[in-house]
Image (cartoon, rainbow, N blue to C red):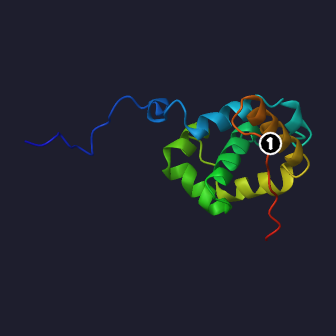
């Protein structure tokens, strides 16, 4: 009569990989950032203190959030808790909004241009975008 519905039972598989289509944008972001050299982020992490979230994971989450028109660090942190593509990119880790904001505004400040240039190069090499016609909008 009805499809079985039980909220209290664990459903398998728990791998988020199955819930993301092969041609989803989140996979493109993942591949592009994975190709970045770890040395790009080395200067931003002098060492000492508590272990940090991996900078590639934070970069993936922020870039994907920007593609989804999510710019607020609080909204990005909420997306990491609630949306499957963000959970997959973050490896189910949950950086809070302060961590995301600090990473974006302090640690990434020096390497932001390098990261975005490398991602853009990847997108053009893989034919995701064409730079034949591009426009720069000067609105704020």
Identified at 88% across, 47% down, the residue is 113
Quadrant of the rendering where the N terminus is positioned: top left
Q: Is residue 128 left or right of residue 86?
A: right
- Of 139 and 46, the residue lying toward us: 139
Image quadrant in which you'd find residue 31: top right
Q: Secondary structure at mark 1?
A: loop
Q: Is residue 86 left or right of residue 41?
A: left
Identified at 65% across, 35% down, the residue is 28
Q: Position of residue 86 (x, y in %)?
A: 57, 45
Relative to 75, residue 121 above or below: above
- Of 92 and 70, the residue lying toward us: 70
Image quadrant in which you'd find residue 104: bottom right
Quadrant of the rendering where the C terminus is positioned: bottom right
Q: Is residue 51 visible?
A: no
Q: Position of residue 50 (x, y in %)?
A: 76, 43
Q: Is residue 133 left or right of residue 63?
A: right
Identified at 32% across, 36% down, the residue is 10
**Residue occupying the far left of the picture:** 1
Q: Identify residue for label 1.
A: 131
Image quadrant in which you'd find residue 118: top right
Q: Position of residue 54 (x, y in %)?
A: 73, 38
């Amino acid at each position: 009569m009805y499809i079985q519905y039980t909220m209290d039972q664990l459903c398998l598989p728990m791998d988020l990989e199955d819930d993301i289509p092969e041609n989803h944008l989140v996979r493109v972001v993942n591949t592009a950032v994975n190709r970045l050299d770890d040395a790009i982020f080395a200067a931003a992490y002098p060492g000492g203190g508590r272990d940090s979230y991996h900078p590639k994971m934070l970069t993936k989450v922020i870039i994907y959030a920007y593609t989804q028109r999510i710019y607020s660090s609080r909204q990005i942190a909420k997306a990491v808790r609630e949306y499957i593509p963000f959970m997959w990119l973050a490896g189910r880790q949950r950086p809070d909004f302060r961590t995301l904001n600090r990473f974006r505004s302090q640690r990434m400040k020096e390497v932001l241009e390098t990261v975005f240039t490398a991602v853009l190069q990847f997108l053009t090499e893989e034919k995701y975008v064409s730079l034949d016609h591009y426009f720069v909008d000067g609105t704020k």
